[in-house]
């Protein structure tokens, strides 16, 4: 017997509805900060320097845009800039980067287990990682641990 999950066709109550929008707005506000600290951590962890020009190229934005964000990240205590040496994460910045990286890995692994191509899984995880709540992440991890990938392979063969 196959279990079927239907989406709800009626509007949720006003409080639940507004909470969904509030959470989404908050995630949008933090997404850029999270992208920057994660990228800085990735560059540093690969033994590269994290320079303004590197961030601009990898994020596909202008150097003035990066400079503005780096000022904000510095004001929030997430990065420090050393003249002629690049950008470094503070302990708080490193902690945030690790949390974001863990969310990214879980989302990407879940998408791969579903059978999404590696390229698309990486691209989609980059956006989804900011919007997935703790409960959903836990469910993703439970599905991965229960061998979702093997289940999906068998399901595709049917």
Image (cartoon, grey):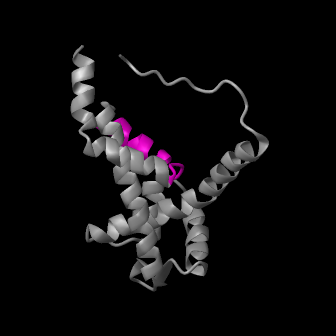
Furthest toward the top, the residue is 158
Residue 129 seen in render: no
Name the image quarter holding residue 91.
bottom left
Question: Is 17 positioned to the left or the right of 48 in the image?
Answer: right
- The majority secondary structure of the magenta stretch comes to helix
Left or right of residue 79, residue 65 in this image: right
Does 108 sit above or below residue 26? Answer: above
Residue 7 drawn above or below residue 19: above
Residue drawn at the location 75% of the way across and 47% of the way down = 15
Tell me where residue 152 sits by quadrant. Answer: top left
Total marks drawn?
0
Q: Position of residue 88 (x, y in %)?
A: 41, 78
Residue range corresponding to the magenta coloring:
118-133
Q: Is residue 158 above or below residue 62?
A: above
Q: Nearer the viewer, residue 14 or 75?
A: 14
Q: Position of residue 97 (x, y in %)?
A: 42, 67
The image shows residue 112 at horizontal and vertical percentages of 30, 38
């Amino acid at each position: 017997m196959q279990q079927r999950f239907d989406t709800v066709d009626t509007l949720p109550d006003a409080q639940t509805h507004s909470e969904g929008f509030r959470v989404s707005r908050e995630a949008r506000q933090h997404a850029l900060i999270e992208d920057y600290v994660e990228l800085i951590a990735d560059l540093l962890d690969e033994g590269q320097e994290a320079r303004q020009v590197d961030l601009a190229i990898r994020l596909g934005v202008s150097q003035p845009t990066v400079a503005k964000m780096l000022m904000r990240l510095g004001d929030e205590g997430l990065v420090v800039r050393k003249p002629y040496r690049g950008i470094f994460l503070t302990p708080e910045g490193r902690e945030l980067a690790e949390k974001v990286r863990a969310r990214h890995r879980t989302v990407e692994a879940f998408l791969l287990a579903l059978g999404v191509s590696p390229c698309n899984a990486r691209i989609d995880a980059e956006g989804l990682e900011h919007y997935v709540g703790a409960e959903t992440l836990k469910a993703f991890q439970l599905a991965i641990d229960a061998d979702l990938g093997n289940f999906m392979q068998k399901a595709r063969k049917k």
